[in-house]
Amino acid sequence: MINNVPWLTTIVFFPILAGLMIPILSSDGNKIIRWYTLGICLLEFSLITYVFYCHFQIDSQSLQLLETFSWIDSIHFRWALGIDGLSMGLILLTGFVTTLATLGAWPITPNTRLFYFLMLVMYSGQIGVFVSRDILLFFLMWELELIPVYLLLSLWGGKKRLYSATKFVLYTAGGSIFLLLAALTMSFSGSDVPSFDIQDSIDKSYPVSLEILIYIGFLVAYAVKLPIIPFHTWLPDTHGEAHYSICMLLAGVLLKMGGYGLIRINLELLTHAHFFLGSGLMLFGAIQIAYASFISMSQHNLKKRIAYSSISHMGFVTIGIGSLTDSGIDGAMLQMISHGLIGAALFFLAGTCYDRTRTYLLDQLGGVATTLPKLFTMFSIFSLASLALLGMSGFVSELLVFIGVSTTEQYSFPFKIVITLVGAIGTVSTSIYLLSMLRRMFYGYRLVNQSNSYLIDLGPRELFILICLFLPILGIGSYPNLILPI
Amino acid sequence: GFLVDSLSLTMAILVTTVGILVMIYSDSYMRYDQGYVRFYAYLSLFTASMSGSVFSPNLIQLYFFWELVGMCSYLLIGFWFTRSSAANACQKAFVTNRIGDFGLLLGILGLYWTTEKTGFVNFLFANIIIVLLFLGPVAKSAQFPLHVWLPDAMEGPTPISALIHAATMVAAGIFFIARIFKLILSLPLAMSIISWVGGLTALLGATLALFQKDLKKGLAYSTMSQLGYMVSALGIGADRSALFHLITHAYSKALLFLGAGSVIHSLEKIVGYSPNKSQNMFFMGGLRRYMPITGTTFLLGTLSLCGIPPLACFWSKDEIITKLWLSSSYLGLVASGTAALTAFYMFRIHLLTFEGDFRASQSDEIDFNYSPQSNKTITFSFWGKTELMKEPAIGQISQNAASLEFRVKNVLSTYFVDPNQSSQIDSSRVLLKPKESDFFMTIPLIVLAIPTVCIGVLGVDIPETQKELGFTSFFNWFVFSSNIFKEYKITEILFEILLDSIGSFSLSLFGQKQIFKSEFSSEKKIISVLGYFAYYAQSWSLNRGFIDYYYDLFFIRGTMFLSQVFLNFDRHIIDGFVNATGLGRGLVCGVDLDLVLSD
């Protein structure tokens, strides 16, 4: 094992440093910048793959590739990185989705340099969140993530982009305050020397009431990201307005940060509090699944419908984490990854559909299947994947979550039945809204607008992205052992 | 893994034979369709996953293929996606199946949970698990509360209706119950629930099939009714007879559907490509003269399904009815009544389609050009009045059906009131005659006719050798029940022929008997006696027993309402709170106010 090379630091810094090179590039046309960014993303992704392949033992449960440098000594703030199976899956997902999102962002023409630079910054920030082993560093990365998203939203969004961007920033910043507070409380309590290291914090023990307080503090921050139910309203607005390549990143990676944090910090560090509050999490998750899918049913905006479906799907993550069983947590993990792929694909499809029809409103769409057969096929495939059809990754994760719920020893029998039933209602209504979305978009025989006679089917670039997203979905779905050992 | 036993082998033989025949058949049926390749891709996927589900050794794998089969069904029902009715139908099918599948999944989870604990299993809980497991077959095999998707599923191409919605996929539910049969056998409560659901479905399906206008929908309800028989038989523990009936019914019904497809295929060129026309039995009639092979094989299928002795379904159905009588006289009564109804509606379908005169040419003419002659507009308005008088009785729900009906009546009335006139029109136009379908479509029909005729004799040997002692008493039952059958049948056939000689589907026209002139007076009495009953039966049948209506009212509207409530809650309460906070914070931070308020 080569510990000399700081692989993780390289992975984190490579995109942002490479992004700094963008202004130097010549500005004749977008082509160079596009290919440059894509190349960087690919390089980064292959770097990640290489590191994981060569320097990471999948068998061992412990943290690997640890790197620690002292950064600010006075508060014992250190640059500490490390990964385990949990973060590895999500890092791979980040790399994968970001690369495809870069490819998907090709139609963007105004101000490409800034756009691609921000994409690369986001890349770094996201990976940074998943590798950091220090709570303060985690917080920093968490915030670093926010800036590019805000700019990407407010510069390349739809009509209401400023409103959405502000809403997003206020929401997440509001959540982050709690995160910071909880992190500080945790580090100062129990010892005179503040320590932010996650490893140290595991060994600490707190009074139960304090632990619950800290737990809730963290939870608020994650609840905004994950969206847990009362904190979700930024998501439809943001997703409704953002450009679809950014939506891919938001749905594919950003939402997963909440789930990751919930597992990494709340589940691992605050086990007692988690034990108390797990039932609440499950309840919220179950309600969220049903609630969001019901809302999604009466949404007329295509992207908002998919956004609510995202919320609904993330409910499974919450339930799985709350179930306190191995299979439940595995299911939550898998659901994060599978939703990252499916959600990204659906947003991308909605965006490509918008590129052609110039509308997101379902009422104005309809009957485009005859002119856009490939889009129709892809949309059908991913909708079916999203409603957890067999053989797709969504099914495996939902099944695992339900197994987790039904086998958990912690809760009473009626409670489990309630959770399962509410989840079941959500699952059934998921199929209703997704299929009716398909029906209203593609089925029937109606020309969209007479003026839009230039509907052209998916090009090779778009097909490539979709197939890339589809393969892992199918792979995980038909052979979940690929990823479960992680 | 794979599991091969007699059960799965029987099913596999069924799936593959019907599958191959349907593939041969649809080569011709779909030749000119744009989605020819897509069709075969779906079809192969379906056959593969169906075989997979048949050979599954465990519930999870079975569930896996089960859902794949459901997906194929979804794709194939919505195959002609430009039809909005097909779009609605495939969504409905999928969602309904989804409800059942979820019950199944919960049942599997419950089973997993209880077997993992290996402790004492609560009796009630075990029953709950079985009922949950049963939900899957209820949806898949179109049993009573979740049957609504099956008639709509007829929007798919007809070979699909034959393969998926008559022979194999709907039978998968029966197969599933048979698979977990040993599990059920120890739970009498669940058993009785299952048998009653089956019995109820059988009766419901038969009554709904009575007055369908659409050829395929009539057959679909008939499928539902027959599946009810099987489920009911499983519920009383007669799994062998249920499977026997599954096989015989699958062949007969596949034959019937392929025959119907052949009819539709040839009729489409004449009356137009809308399913309202090409599948409408009022436009058919006398087709046996034009398409002898289809007509004869269809007749064989009809006879078999009605349970005429030497044919396949007779053996299996009588076995079921006998056993139902033995287990519970109520169920036996239901089953016998259903058998009588089956004979009625199947002969109605057959006679309307293949006997009498070909009605499409006239109707076509009048349908499109009924206005030019003033004489006709008068009758039109006259009929319109009677229609209005009738309407409150039918109720608002049947308005759609009534308006459709109205058109047909209009057509028929002009035809009957004034035969000379319509013949004039006929002569003025070169009539298209329906043709027999080509070789590749008739071959599967003939091949399917063989098992329809003789598979019953094969199957009946099994109980004979096994139950040597009990068979004598059974035999009496056989004779007795088949006697009942014949009696029923003779009256019904006579009745039907009588009706058809009026030639006008007269039960639906009881209110307008004064229109029929003296030459019809002999039939008047029958009409008036049966009129009231028939009228309600018709409206029941055409409105699908009002079940869809109430589903629509309670579930769909309820869901939409709930969804709207949630949306408003989300938009105004939660988001309103957020915006208000944002406004406050915006003041502090100096963010532009308009920006926040612009929502």
Image (cartoon, rainbow, N blue to C red):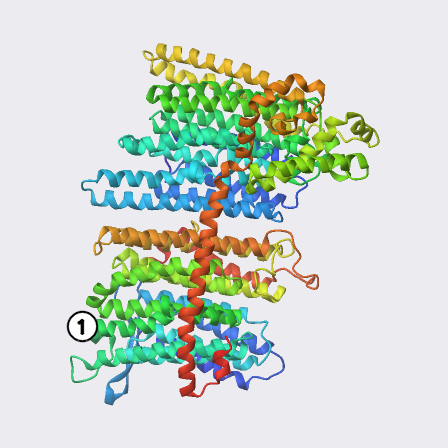
Q: Residue at 29% x, 30% y: name it.
A: B185
In the rendered image, which residue does mark 1 sit on? A209
- Left/right placement of residue B313 relative to residue A260 reads right
Q: Nearer the viewer, residue B387 or A394?
A: B387
Residue B206 location (% of width, % of height): 49, 28
- The single residue placed furthest to the bottom in the displayed view is A74
Determine the residue positioned at 38% across, 24% down.
B331
Disc 1, SS: helix
Q: In the rendered image of this protein, does residue B539 appear above or below residue A358?
A: above
Classed neighbour count for the residue bearing mark 1: other residues with Cα under 10 Å, few (<14), some (14–19), many (≥20): few
The answer to whether residue B181 is seen in the rendering is: no
Q: Quadrant of the N terminus of chain B?
A: top left
The chain under label 1 reads A
- Compared with residue A124, is residue B56 higher up or lower down, i.e. above or below? above
Q: Is residue B205 visible?
A: yes
Q: Is residue A351 above or below residue B125?
A: below
Q: Position of residue B461 (x, y in %)?
A: 41, 16
What amino acid does circle 1 point to? Answer: Ser
